[in-house]
Amino acid sequence: ISRSIGDIYLKKSEYNREPLFAKFRLPEPFKRPILSAEPSIAVHTLQPQDQFVIFASDGLWEHLSNQEAVDLVHNNPHN
C-alpha cells in the first residue's frame, strides 16, 4: 500500500532532488519510474475447501513464504 502513496521520488525523477534527504536520493537520473503503483493481480476462484484469503503487499512476502503465511493464519483463527 505504501508504494501507491509514498516513494514518489522513485516514480517521478523531478522529485529525486532537494528537499528530499540526500540519503534517499538516487545518484543517477532515471528516465522511467523505478516503482509503480500499478498492482499485480492474481485471480483464484474460491473453492468450497478454501478457508481464508490473504491480502498482502510485497512487504509481507519479503519476510514470509506462502506456506509460512498460511501457517500463521491457520494457527491464529478469528471468526
Image (cartoon, rainbow, N blue to C red):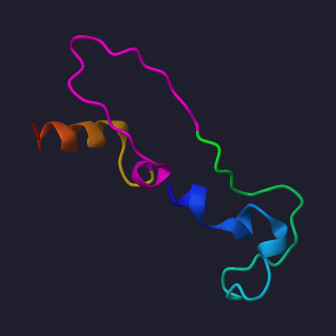
Indicate the quadrant containing the C terminus: top left, top right, bottom left or bottom right: top left
In this picture, is 66 found above or below 48? below
Q: Position of residue 1 (x, y in %)?
A: 50, 54
| Quarter occupied by residue 15 | bottom right
Q: Nearer the viewer, residue 77 or 75?
A: 77
In this picture, is 1 found above or below 78? below
Would residue 45 be counted in the magenta stretch? yes
Q: Nearer the viewer, residue 7 or 28?
A: 7
Q: Position of residue 51 (x, y in %)?
A: 20, 24
The stretch of residues the image draws in magenta is: 40-61
Q: Residue furthest toward the front?
A: 5
**Residue at x-position 83% and y-position 68%:** 13
Q: Residue furthest toward the top?
A: 48
**What secondary structure is the magenta-colored segment mainly?**
loop
Q: Does residue 26 appear left or right of residue 77 in this picture?
A: right
Q: Position of residue 10 (x, y in %)?
A: 72, 65
**Residue at x-position 11% and y-position 41%:** 78
Count of labels shown? 0
| Quarter occupied by residue 33 | bottom right
**Residue at x-position 11% and y-position 39%:** 77
Would residue 47 be counted in the magenta stretch? yes
